[in-house]
Image (cartoon, coloured by chain):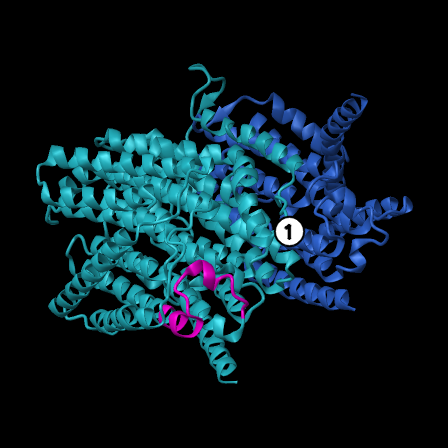
């Protein structure tokens, strides 16, 4: 048995249990820090083992049987918990899904698997893709866990009305990371499904943390949508087992994409689309904002939404020019455009980040749907860069909320006076999301090439307009950050755990700019070569890489602007122009009737222009899904 | 070794000559505009005199940081111009251009002045309006020629404009934004007092304003070089035609500038996006159908 894999899934879970039991704050915090470091260390060890080729894939029969039975017991327990909570809160759809799924899976595992003698040869898939995912889950997830320790201290000082349940919160985060690691390593579809359901449950528990009405509503919405996706997953597994006689992911994707094979591919894609919060399923991710920030960071960067993307990446041989591939491409594209436009209309920083996550996942999914080597190259890099930058942004916004007591972007013009380091972290994160030498743009560049080369004209148009919208909403945020309002506000304690975590995130985001050619040639290109059987080239040429590094060094000058070069700068400082109605400082002016008013300036949101985009996005996505479902059913019946 | 030396000399040449040409064009613009309005107009070299005067003015600032972005903006715009004229990757050039324009916007925000802020928001809106078209130009050229590199595109057997007439028209439409001409000069204009004073540049004076002016000269060259790419091809004489086309486009923009009143931001955005969408999509679809035969 590959012990390391077992360790990297079970140790976080064990620590989670300990965290849950031990209620002494110091011990609990230390355990959480230990868990964070452990997760990071184990993910790096897994990567090293893969590198050295030490990895043994054979497993003891006995261990597998134990794990199988343990899973059944846990599945039943989870189902009971969901039914109980559902009835308690009068939410009946989520329990309904569970009541359908559990017997279905139990019957499948007990009857069909035994009867058809479905064997699993490869329990674990450890290739370049799973290593990348393990590293993302481990490193980014671990850093988020570390940040949580510092964050939760202050959170409960600010929110006295929320009952302190740190044990529960820490435990769920660690469990989440364990399940996510399992998800990206297992090859047995039943095991993947089990981890899939655990991540749904964990996100449900995290979102409902505050126990307020809104939190409970949103947590059940997340649970319902994800269990709906889980149902599609379960149906896909049953179909796979009965018609294709396999429960191994690696075998399914090696089949020819005939009508029969495309049915489970469609069902799994549907599950992935719900998990990755694509239109029309996006509402759960937006609702997830009510939870404390580390959980949002976790959902948006390292775990949850990346689970859907990972599954699609695995399924990519069945996508491309098949009907399922076309529809996945289209839904991703529509989501990218609609979510980017909707992000313009938001002023709450967390909601902007949420829409940007949805949009970027849309772009990733579009790339996966196209499934050419170039497109997959772009998709994998988008996954990596997005995880790091988005996590940095969420964690920074969490800390901004503690400092300013607001997460409205318009209030962030005061941030420079409170914490310069937070301004720099946010600027790095935002630049990482859309500016040129940074990660996301490199991948977007490759994606653009891939879209043209694969002749997807509609996606090209979508990308052009979506990119313009992306530029708008990020820049206006940056604008608020660089503004020097001159107001002095009270500072709050900024914990060491948070600082360390944020600092490493920022370093990772920056270093990605010049490390990506290395990752490309050592990890991503070999993966694509294995998959397609011919050697793929990096879509970004070496000459351009040098030019981008030159740009990067130019951009490094940016933070320098915050340092006054000398105390005696030449030039006279004057007041800003206010049509001659200045009062004496830059904060207020003489309004009519001799009243002195404070100047405020608010960003543009253009709600009347882009407010309805969501409706149309949902409509197009729903119709295209129905269309492809009809085509697939018709294909089988024929 | 010689190759590198020639390259460096070329780059220095581009960096020096483009603002001179840009400044000259700016002077010509003022002359023609004056004549269209029945005035005599200043000397053609007036922009250079203005910049010289600005450089000698007293330094006045509203805070310590905001001037910096203007210099960064200039750096990135120069980078773009060099990249395009040296025959580099067009898409990369567009990304660098985006950073350059963005730095200018940040300069406006950083001054924390109400008028500059509104100017910045409007400038950003203008960027959003023209960005899809600029990207589409690069995409169209790549789709047709198979390369993003300017040197490959202008070395083809036929000029790109034959295949991309609609995208070219869309580009001419958004050129008005890039050259800061009416009806799309929402964020700042060269004409006297407007409703938001001098918009994004309200708080810039002296040396900084001179830098902004020089940046605009570079930007003019950059914008016109796109027109050039559409017209030039392998035949040497075509480069003369390309220069003439740039000139014609510039004159056209001056006439439009003088003939139109400023529009609202909604009209600016929706018309630019509409033109880009219909012309761009139509052109790409026709091109993809042609490539099948």
Tag 1 residue: B134
**Residue at image coords 38%, 38%:** A426
**Residue B280 is covered by the magenta coloring:** no
Whether residue A227 can be seen here:
yes
On screen, residue B206 above or below B287: above
On screen, residue A88 above or below B43: below
On screen, residue B240 above or below A542: below
Q: Is residue A369 left or right of residue A120?
A: right
What is the chain identity of the residue bearing mark 1? B
Q: Where is residue A278 shown, x and y percent of the image?
A: 41, 62
When asked about the image quadrant of residue A73, the answer is bottom left
Q: Where is residue A229 shown, x and y percent of the image?
A: 34, 66
The colour chain B appears in is blue
**Residue at image coords 91%, 45%:** B237
Tell me where the magenta segment starts and ends, as one range: A237-257
> Closest to the observer: B169 or A146?
A146
**Residue A246 is covered by the magenta coloring:** yes
> Closest to the observer: A379 or A476?
A379
Q: Where is residue A629 shown, x and y percent of the image?
A: 46, 77
**Residue at image coords 62%, 23%:** B55
> Closest to the observer: A417 or A52?
A52
When asked about the image quadrant of residue A548, the answer is top right
Whether residue A437 can be seen here:
no
Question: How many labels, in total?
Answer: 1
The colour chain A appears in is cyan
Q: In this view, does A161 lie to the left or right of A347?
A: left
Q: Is residue A307 left or right of residue B238?
A: left
Say few, some or many: other residues with alpha carbon within 10 Å of mark 1 (under 14 / 14 to 19 / 20 or more).
many
Q: Where is residue A354 shown, x and y percent of the image?
A: 36, 53
- Name the element at disc 1: helix
> Closest to the observer: A636 or A226?
A636
């Amino acid at each position: 048995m590959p012990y390391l894999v077992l360790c990297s899934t079970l140790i976080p879970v064990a620590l989670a249990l300990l965290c849950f039991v031990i209620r002494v704050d110091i011990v609990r915090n230390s355990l959480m820090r230990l868990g964070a470091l452990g997760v990071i260390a184990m993910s790096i060890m897994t990567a090293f083992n893969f590198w050295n080729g030490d990895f043994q894939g054979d497993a003891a029969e006995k261990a597998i049987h134990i794990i199988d039975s343990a899973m059944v017991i846990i599945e039943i327990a989870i189902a009971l918990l969901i039914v109980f909570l559902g009835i308690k809160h009068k939410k009946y759809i989520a329990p309904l899904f569970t009541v359908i799924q559990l017997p279905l899976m139990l019957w499948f595992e007990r009857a069909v698997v035994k009867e058809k003698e479905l064997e699993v040869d490869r329990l674990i898939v450890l290739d370049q893709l799973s290593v990348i995912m393990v590293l993302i889950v481990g490193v980014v997830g671990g850093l988020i866990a570390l940040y949580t320790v510092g964050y939760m201290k202050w959170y409960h000082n600010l929110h006295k009305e929320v009952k302190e349940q740190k044990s529960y919160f820490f435990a769920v985060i660690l469990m989440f990371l364990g399940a996510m690691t399992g998800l990206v390593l297992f090859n047995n579809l039943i095991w993947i499904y089990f981890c899939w359901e655990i991540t749904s449950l964990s996100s449900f528990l995290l979102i409902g943390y505050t126990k307020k009405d809104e939190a409970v509503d949103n947590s059940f919405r997340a649970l319902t949508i994800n269990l709906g996706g889980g149902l599609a997953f379960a149906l896909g597994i049953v179909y796979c087992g009965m018609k294709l006689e396999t429960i191994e992911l690696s075998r399914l994707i090696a089949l020819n994409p005939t009508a029969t094979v495309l049915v489970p591919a469609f069902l799994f894609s549907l599950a992935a689309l719900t998990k990755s919060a694509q239109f029309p399923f996006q509402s759960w991710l937006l609702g997830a904002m009510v939870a404390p920030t580390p959980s949002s960071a976790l959902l948006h960067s390292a775990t949850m939404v990346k689970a859907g993307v990972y599954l699609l990446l695995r399924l990519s041989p069945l996508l491309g020019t098949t009907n399922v591939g076309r529809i996945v491409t289209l839904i991703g594209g529509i989501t990218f455009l609609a979510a980017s436009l909707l992000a313009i209309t938001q002023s709450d920083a967390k909601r902007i980040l949420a829409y940007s996550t949805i949009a970027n996942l849309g772009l990733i999914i579009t790339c996966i749907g196209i499934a050419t080597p170039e497109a997959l190259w772009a998709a994998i890099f988008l996954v990596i860069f997005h995880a790091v930058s988005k996590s940095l942004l969420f964690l920074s916004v969490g800390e901004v909320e503690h400092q300013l007591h607001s997460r409205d972007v318009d209030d962030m013009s005061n941030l420079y006076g409170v914490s310069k380091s937070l301004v720099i972290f946010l600027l790095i994160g935002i630049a990482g999301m859309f500016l040129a030498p940074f990660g996301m743009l490199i991948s977007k560049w490759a994606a653009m090439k891939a879209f043209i080369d694969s002749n997807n004209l509609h996606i090209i148009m979508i990308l052009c307009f979506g990119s313009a919208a992306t530029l708008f909403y990020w820049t206006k945020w940056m604008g608020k950050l660089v503004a020097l309002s001159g107001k002095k506000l009270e500072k709050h304690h900024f914990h060491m755990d948070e600082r360390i975590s944020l600092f490493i995130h920022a370093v990772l985001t920056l270093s990605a700019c010049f490390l990506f050619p290395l990752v490309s040639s050592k990890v991503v290109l070999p993966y694509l070569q294995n998959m397609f059987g011919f050697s793929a080239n990096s879509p970004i040429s070496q000459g351009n890489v040098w030019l981008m590094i030159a740009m990067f060094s130019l951009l490094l000058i940016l933070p320098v602007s915050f340092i006054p070069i000398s105390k005696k700068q030449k030039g006279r400082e004057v007041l800003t122009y206010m049509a001659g109605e200045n009062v004496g400082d830059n904060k207020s002016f003489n309004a009519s009737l001799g009243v002195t008013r404070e100047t405020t300036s608010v960003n543009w949101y253009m709600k009347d222009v882009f407010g309805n985009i969501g409706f149309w996005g949902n409509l197009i996505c729903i119709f295209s899904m129905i269309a492809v479902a009809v085509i697939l059913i018709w294909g089988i019946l024929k | 070794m010689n190759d590198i030396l020639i390259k460096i000399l070329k780059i220095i040449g581009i960096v020096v000559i483009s603002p001179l040409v840009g400044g000259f064009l700016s002077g010509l613009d003022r002359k023609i505009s004056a004549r269209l309005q029945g005035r005599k107009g200043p000397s053609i070299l007036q922009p250079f005199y203005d910049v010289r005067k600005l450089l000698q003015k007293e330094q006045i600032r509203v805070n310590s940081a905001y001037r910096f972005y203007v210099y960064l903006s200039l750096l990135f715009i120069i980078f773009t111009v060099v990249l395009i004229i040296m025959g580099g990757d067009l898409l990369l050039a567009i990304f660098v251009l985006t950073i350059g324009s963005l730095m200018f916007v940040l300069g406006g925000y950083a001054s924390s002045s109400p008028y500059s802020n509104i100017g910045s928001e409007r400038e950003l809106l203008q960027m959003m309006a023209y960005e899809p078209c600029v990207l589409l130009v690069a995409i169209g050229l790549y789709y047709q020629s198979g390369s993003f590199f300017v040197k490959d595109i202008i070395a083809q057997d036929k000029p790109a404009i034959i295949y991309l007439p609609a995208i070219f028209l869309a580009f001419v439409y958004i050129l008005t934004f890039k050259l800061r001409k009416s009806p799309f000069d929402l964020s700042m204009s060269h004409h006297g007092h407007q409703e938001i004073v001098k918009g994004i540049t309200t708080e810039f004076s002296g040396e900084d304003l001179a830098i902004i002016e020089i940046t605009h000269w570079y930007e003019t060259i950059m914008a016109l070089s796109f027109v050039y790419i559409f017209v030039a091809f392998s035949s040497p004489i075509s480069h003369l035609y390309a220069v003439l086309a740039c000139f014609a486009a510039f004159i056209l923009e001056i006439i439009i500038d003088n003939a139109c009143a400023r529009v609202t931001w909604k009209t600016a955005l929706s018309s630019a996006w509409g033109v880009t969408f219909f012309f761009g999509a139509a052109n790409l679809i026709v091109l993809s159908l042609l490539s099948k035969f």
